[in-house]
Image (spheres, coloured by chain):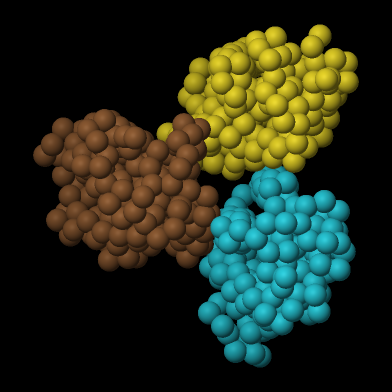
Chain colours: A yellow, B brown, C cyan
Amino acid sequence: MRLGSRGALALFGIGAAGGLVGDACHVATGTTTYLDATLPFIWKSQLWFPVAVGLATVTTGELRLRLGPPRSGRDPAEAVTAIGSVVALYALSAVVTDEDPLAATVLIWTLAIVIAARFGGGMPALACAASAAVLGPLAEILVVEADLARYAQSADGLIGVAEWLPALYFAFGIVAARLAEILMPR
Amino acid sequence: MRLGSRGALALFGIGAAGGLVGDACHVATGTTTYLDATLPFIWKSQLWFPVAVGLATVTTGELRLRLGPPRSGRDPAEAVTAIGSVVALYALSAVVTDEDPLAATVLIWTLAIVIAARFGGGMPALACAASAAVLGPLAEILVVEADLARYAQSADGLIGVAEWLPALYFAFGIVAARLAEILMPR
Amino acid sequence: MRLGSRGALALFGIGAAGGLVGDACHVATGTTTYLDATLPFIWKSQLWFPVAVGLATVTTGELRLRLGPPRSGRDPAEAVTAIGSVVALYALSAVVTDEDPLAATVLIWTLAIVIAARFGGGMPALACAASAAVLGPLAEILVVEADLARYAQSADGLIGVAEWLPALYFAFGIVAARLAEILMPR
């Protein structure tokens, strides 16, 4: 694994923690509701959720490093800003859930594109973002189909998941790719 | 024309597309409502709207290039961030329409000033922003007076248009000026 | 005083003005309500409020300069962006007052951390931010206990003050510290 064990562990922890924080916002505002309580809850999330986000972060980061040589720069402040940007976008999506879906979707997509322009780096990062934007919502559609959780009626227009969900995963993919570049062993 | 035909065409397209996206948000949340359907609709806008925004973008960009030599730097990522910033501000103004006008106005103005500090460049850009902040709302006041469209009651305190409208046009002027610098022929 | 009289005066003015603007947003959206009108009102604030914020800005800036040598860079645009960022966060906190406290708190904290990563500079700035994040809410708790003002029911979960208040003061501390570096005499 090009991430190395430390890089993978760090990405897993960042993804799981960020997922827990964002998901707590979604549950708090009613954007999402868990329908199943088979596993224990960690804060407001079923145990499988932070594990899935952590693994997705590691997978996306590893994909980034296999797609091409990392860009330079290992500024810890950039890592903090990148993580903060996507967690802020996550929290913002929880806050605008009751707004008109079109306006919410344009807002989240536009900010996702700003995040991509700031932290993205050419085709490898774009490929990570695009695959996250497709696979992430697809996985959540399966979660909804399996009656494990559901989205609020004001935010379930995309086969049961939120219209802005691909944008959030797009930003996630950009940031996971950048973190992989910053955290990889050298 | 200092923009050149390609630069003018690009600015027209960017302005028209951005206008359509932002206006769709305004219509979706009820910030604005069209009262006249003489011309065909393009998505949620009457045809004259994207044309007017496109022409305003070209005019503002051309004004920028006549006011002084362009600054250096032609980074495509900066263009994407600049466009994204003003479209995000546009969408945000749609989302906060039902909030208190003072808080909404302070929020939009403050973010417009942050955009100006990031993308602005001295007096030429400031002149573009100031003229857009005056002429844009003035044009929209005429649109409202002509009963072509109206603003929501919660956002019509400035002679019938939104209190935060000058701030949105201020940011538009800054970004149109910067795009002109980036897109002009060299 | 390491700020010098001009630097202290500038910081006082910036803090008082920013406080007035942000407080007007809080009063307008009902986030806070003054319960006492002994002193005259300046715009929407009791006179003591801008004075207190101005003094806190000077004190935080002076603390910064005593904790270590200032970083380089005196870009006026950076000062404008720093001030704009914290005023925007202030206005945003007014706009999300009726949202779920957890989502609002995550949003404000995350943006405060992004502001810290952008404008902060090592331990001295962090110490200013941490002390502001503790002392600011503490002072406001005393204001609430003294029945001078109160927070809305949807935003009074932290001993009577808003849950996100420490995050707002954290960002304030970062920005006051950076402004002190920019404004100090050299």
Image height of A163 relative to C65, above or below = above
Q: Position of residue C157 (x, y in %)?
A: 76, 58
Q: Position of residue B155 (x, y in %)?
A: 37, 58
Quarter of the N terminus of chain C within the rendering: bottom right
Number of numbered callouts drawn:
0
Instruction: Give the left or right position of residue C75, taking residue A66 as reference.
Output: left
Image height of B72 relative to C172, above or below = above
Image height of A105 relative to B139, above or below = above
Answer with the quarter of the image where residue A135 lies: top right
Residue lying furthest left: B38
Answer with the quarter of the image where residue A60 lies: top right
Q: Position of residue B182 (x, y in %)?
A: 40, 38
Residue B10 visible, this orientation: yes
Residue A144 visible, this orientation: no
- Which of C20/B79 is in front? B79
Quarter of the C terminus of chain C within the rendering: bottom right
| Residue at left offset 82%, top offset 51% | C122
Instruction: Give the left or right position of residue A10, taking residue A119 as reference.
Output: right
Q: Position of residue C180 (x, y in %)?
A: 72, 67
| Residue at left offset 48%, top offset 48% | B119
- Which of A27/A128 is in front? A128
| Residue at left offset 80%, top offset 72% | C62
Instruction: Give the left or right position of residue A145, taking residue B30 as reference.
Output: right
- Which of B159/C185 is in front? C185
- Which of A102/A85 is in front? A85
